Amino acid sequence: MEKALYRLSRGTCYFPDCPRRIMEVVEGEPMVAVDIAHVYGANPGSARYDESMTDAERRAFENLILLCVPHHKLVDGRRRVEFPPAMLQGWKKSNEPAEGIEALASAGLTDEILETVMEQIVTKVGPKREVEVDLDAGLVMTATDVAAAGTMKGMATILDINPHMKELPKILVANIRNTGTLAASVEGVDLWVVLGELKNSSGFTLMGRNDFGASNPLLPYRLEDGNAVRWLTKMETIVGIVEAAREQGLTVLGIRASVRLGSGEKIESDLLEWLDLT
């Protein structure tokens, strides 16, 4: 039960792709930073209210989700009809661990005690350092504006629809987020081209290259808990490596980003599949 609760408390707002953390440490104290919302409304007139349910069922753990304040207002406010119970149940399933959920439900956990229990678990386990990184393809729109397209295929689609954007500088964007409760020191950001023939080998590596000295953070960079920073690399830099690999008869699978932390840890992104862009 505690394992499941702790994993739950270490997550984010259940709304898809929302980065707001469920727990934040304020002046050394763990605080719940989101609202407790209901799949089926708690009171008559509330969103998704089901009069056939009992009050105990409405307060039960299986009817609860966690949303940041803006998304709670969206889901239970004027756009409530866009968020049926089945959708919210899907969010709950995606954000909670499979193990321990039955134990939580059978323990009679309700919205009245959920915040207290979560804070107790975080206090008991202690603060953790957790950093995540993902790698996107993007475009430099202006000196201060970068548009992330996500995958290389997404970039290709954008360029097909907007051919006038083909002349814009193409970049790779490493998005680094501190999702833990301790500050982290970012010592370096590396990229490497992953080659099919080498399987898990790093292939061709770019260590610490800084193509955007004016906008990339000065390293080492102290990344506070709950904050994020991005590291930009020119796409043309990678194109040269891809061409060199192909000249040697190697197959290019994609690109990964790796963040080196002051703690000695290395955090890797998922593979960004490579696609030639014209």
Image: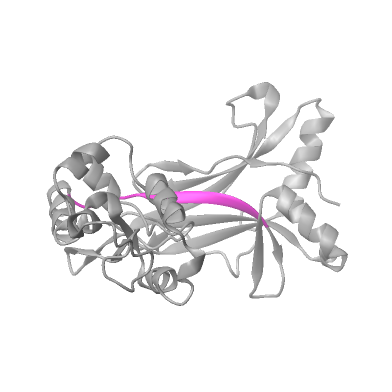
Colouring scheme applied when the structure was drawn: one colour
Image point 76% across, 43% down: which residue? 275
Which residue is most to the front? Answer: 52
In the picture shown, does residue 108 fall above or below 183? Answer: above
Residue 184 sits in quarter: bottom left
* Residue 5 drawn above or below residue 179: above
Determine the image quadrant of residue 257.
top right
Q: In front here: 119 or 193?
A: 119
Q: Is residue 71 left or right of residue 244?
A: left
Left or right: 84, with 113 as reference point? right
User: Can the viewer see residue 222?
Assistant: yes
Residue 142 is situated, as x and y percent measured from the top left of the image, at 71, 75
How many numbered marks appear?
A: 0
**Near-viewer residue (195 or 29):** 29
Q: Residue sitting at 59 percent across and 27 percent down?
A: 201
Q: x and y percent of residue 183 in the render?
A: 32, 59
Indicate yes or no whether the magenta region holds residue 99.
no
Quadrant of the rendered structure where residue 105 is? Answer: top left
Quadrant position of the N terminus in the picture? top left
The reply to whether residue 261 is visible in this rendering is no
Residue 179 drawn at (x, y percent): 37, 55
Q: Residue at x 33, y 37 (%)?
A: 98
Q: Report whether 201 appears left or right of 253.
A: left
Q: Provide the residue span drawn in magenta.
A: 126-137
